[in-house]
Amino acid sequence: MTKQNIFGYLRNFFSDSKEDQTFLIHYRKHDSESIKLRLKELMTEKKPFLQRRYHIKELADELQIPVHQLSAFLNQVLGTSFNDHINQYRIDHCIELLNANLAGRSNLEQLSKKRGFNNRSSFTTAFKKFTGQKPFDYIKRKTFLQIMNSYRYKAVNNYNICIYLPLKLYSTFNED
C-alpha cells in the first residue's frame, strides 16, 4: 500500500459522513410507465397474486424483466415492497368478493387460502394493514350495515305507504 492509499483509507475510515449504500436505478419516464402498465395488465388479467407462494422471480419472468429491476421499480417508483404489492391485490380481491357476496359463507381460513395466503395469520395481518380493521370486524360491520339498510328500506317504504294511502283515499272521496 502506498502512502497516499493509506491516508485515503484512514480518512474514509474516520470520516463522520458515511456514504449511503442504496443502489438506485434510474428510469426514463417511458420505461416506468411501460412497466407499470404491463404489471397492472398482468395483475388484472391473469391474477397471479392468487397463487400461494408466488415469488418475485415468477413475476419478473412474466414481465420479462430482471428481478433486480422489478424490485427497484416496486421500491422506487411504486414505493412498496413485492410482498406488500401482492398482498394489496389479494386483499382488494377479497374485499371485492365480500362486497359482492361471492365469498359465500366460508371461514377466514378458507378465504385466506383461496386468496393466495399461506395461513390465516398472514391474511389477518395484511387485511388489517390495508383496511385498518381485522377481516372478522370488516365482515361483521358489512353484515350489520346490510341489515340496517334493509330495515331502513322497509321502514321508509312502510312510512311512504302509510302517508300515500290516506292521500289516495282522500282524493278518491273528494272527486265528487
Image (cartoon, grey):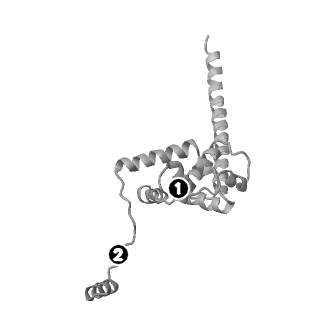
Instruction: Identify the secondary structure beneath mark 1.
Output: helix
Identity of the residue furthest to the left in this view: 4
**Residue 74, above or below 7:** above
Where residue 12 sits, quadrant-wise, is: bottom left
Whole-percent x and y of residue 169?
65, 20
Q: Nearer the viewer, residue 129 or 47?
A: 47
Image point (67%, 55%), residue name = 112
Marks 2 and 1, how far apart at CA: 29 Å
Whole-percent x and y of residue 50?
63, 50
- Amino acid found under the numbered disc labelled 2: Glu
Return the mark for residue 20. Answer: none
Residue 51 seen anywhere in this rendered image of the structure: yes
Give the number of the mark in front: 2 or 1: 2
Whole-percent x and y of residue 166?
65, 25
Identity of the residue furthest to the front in this view: 1
Instruction: Identify the secondary structure beneath mark 2.
Output: loop
Image quadrant in which the C terminus is located: top right
Write down the residue under mark 2: 19
Image point (65%, 25%), residue name = 165
Write down the residue under mark 1: 85
- Amino acid found under the numbered disc labelled 1: His
**Residue 17, above or below 138:** below
Residue 130 seen anywhere in this rendered image of the structure: no
